[in-house]
Image: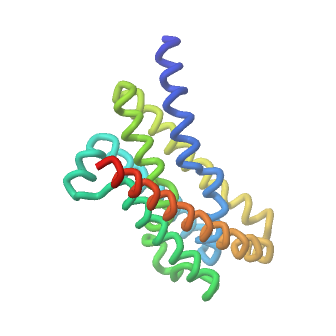
């Protein structure tokens, strides 16, 4: 039994770090700052469902899917970074990332992917499933998605605490951080492509 919990810990922690629900919470709040409480709940639920389904897909068939489509992890990282960068630029220039009526789109992109289920998380899942029993990684992934859902659900508390003015100011600041994360993701993707090119 101790080995079971040790394996759970060894798989849960790296996934928790790369999913980074705590770090992504400010972006969830920023992206949904013009939505109603009901719309925010819907966004959180759809985002976690999207991330969970994508995670399960890559957990069971990750390397196969990427190989079949001829997509490297580096290229996936670059694409994810470009998407985030476009959202960040749109927010800084127009004051919102997407129209409020399109909360389903927001939940899928960018919250579900690439923020929650991004290249780092997908790569980690693929690596873990090659090192630990599938059921161990599956349990850790499920626990991470539950933790992510609970953390994202806390956005209502932050909104009530900060108020609309504070929320708007924080959204502006974090849109810059989102742009920085996007550029960092693109740079990492380019480095991965360079490494893969050197190996091949």
Name which residue lies at 61% across and 73% down.
Answer: 36
Pick the residue in front: 91 or 104.
91
Pick the residue in front: 106 or 74.
74
Q: Please, is residue 36 above or below residue 113 in the view?
A: below
Residue 136 in the figure: left or right of residue 41: left
Name which residue lies at 19% across and 53% down.
Answer: 68
Q: Residue furthest bottom?
A: 94
Name which residue lies at 45% across and 38% down.
Answer: 141
Residue 127 in the figure: left or right of residue 38: left
Q: Residue furthest top?
A: 1
Residue 74 in the figure: left or right of residue 145: left
Q: Please, is residue 79 above or below residue 62 in the view?
A: below
Pick the residue in front: 25 or 176.
176
Tell me where residue 173 appears, x and y as whole percent.
73, 72
Tell me where residue 90 appears, x and y as whole percent.
56, 82
Tell me where residue 46 appears, x and y as whole percent.
45, 60
In this rendering, does residue 117 appear at all?
yes
Tell me where residue 87 appears, x and y as whole percent.
53, 76
């Amino acid at each position: 039994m101790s080995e079971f919990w040790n394996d759970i810990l060894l798989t849960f922690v790296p996934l928790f770090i790369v999913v980074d629900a705590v770090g992504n919470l400010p972006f969830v709040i920023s992206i949904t700052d013009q939505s109603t409480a009901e719309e925010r709940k819907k966004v959180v639920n759809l985002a976690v469902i999207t991330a969970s389904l994508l995670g399960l897909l890559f957990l069971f068939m990750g390397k196969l899917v990427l190989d079949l489509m001829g997509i490297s992890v580096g290229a996936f990282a670059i694409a994810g970074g470009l998407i985030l960068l476009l959202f960040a630029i749109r927010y800084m220039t127009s004051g919102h990332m997407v129209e409020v009526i399109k909360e389903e789109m927001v939940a899928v992109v960018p919250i579900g992917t690439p923020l929650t289920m991004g290249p780092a998380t997908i790569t980690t899942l693929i690596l873990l499933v090659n090192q630990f029993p599938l059921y161990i990684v599956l349990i850790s992934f499920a626990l991470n998605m539950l933790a992510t859902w609970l953390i994202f659900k806390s956005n209502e508390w932050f909104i009530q605490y900060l108020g609309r003015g504070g929320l708007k100011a924080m959204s502006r600041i974090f849109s810059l951080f989102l742009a920085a994360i996007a550029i960092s993701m693109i740079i990492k993707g380019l480095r991965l492509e360079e490494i893969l090119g050197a190996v091949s």
